[in-house]
Amino acid sequence: MAQVSHEEHGKKVAAMFGRIAGWYDFLNHFLSGGQDIYWRYRLAKLVRPAKEGLVLDLAAGTLDVSVELTRQYPDVKVLAMDFAYPMLSCGKGKKLEGKHIGRSEVIAAIQADGKKLPLPDCCLDGATISFGIRNILPREDAYKEVLRALKPGARFCILEFGSGSKRIWKGVYNFYLNKVLPLMGKVVSGDSGAYSYLADTIRSFPDERTLGEELQNAGFGRVMFIPLLSGIVYIHVAEKPSE
């Protein structure tokens, strides 16, 4: 029964992101004051894939992280996977070295479920997920799938909001999260539910230490986390144990 509810949750989330796909990039930049661009740069910097390696960008959305990965590692190939096809479709319109992304030899955009990756064991030289892990239930299934597909010693790098239950900037951030963000998201995108959902998932998300423990319990070895913007956002880096 629980599995059915998780599947329904996934379908609802995919439909919601499909509705706001056209506004997604603008709202990310606007609501973060442009900080999201730097956060994604830092995320990609920490992946450190092998030369000419294969990197998974899970919950790739409109492919911003995928593009950043190819900028920092020009010789890698990126598998951009997302459950919401309209998000990937919007990303395909972006440019990469003067060429459309599409299904190129550099970035392949594929609709897929993060809990059932269409990948063989030990094929990835790195993996990322940006503001997507909180949308996958149960998270543990995604952890195990990524771990299975990673090569020994490869990194899984997660960019995600910290727990919204902590008071940050004397509560100013919490007010912004609970009141301002849903209102602005509704005004711009016309979707009243999407950014209320965002605030709800941030409030209910585990703190950085608990998330690190989840990754270790899933089988990852060394795990570290890096706070950004006073802990509003964190990057977690989890390595698959070397054989």
Image: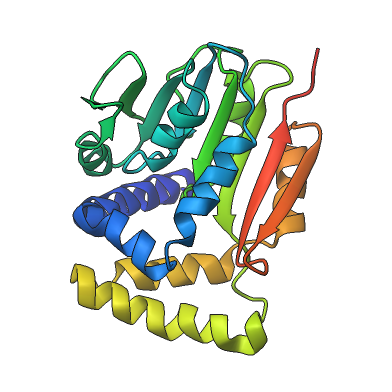
Image label count: 0
135 over 188 or under it: above or below: above
Side of 239 where 198 appears, left or right: left
Colour option used: rainbow
Q: x, y percentage for residue 238?
A: 71, 36
For the point 81% across and 12% down, the residue is: 243
User: 86 or 103: which is nearer to us?
Assistant: 103
Any part of residue 173 in sight: yes
143 over 210 or under it: above or below: above
For the point 59% across and 13% down, the residue is: 51
For the point 35% across and 67% down, the residue is: 30
Side of 44 where 88 appears, left or right: left
Q: Specify the quadrant of the image occupied by residue 127.
A: top right
User: 96 or 77: which is nearer to us?
Assistant: 96
66 over 191 or under it: above or below: above
Q: x, y percentage for residue 41?
A: 53, 44
38 over 106 or under it: above or below: below
Residue reaching furthest front?
98
Q: x, y percentage for residue 14?
A: 30, 48
For the point 68% across and 23% down, the residue is: 154
Q: x, y percentage for residue 66?
A: 41, 33
Side of 88 where 151 appears, left or right: right
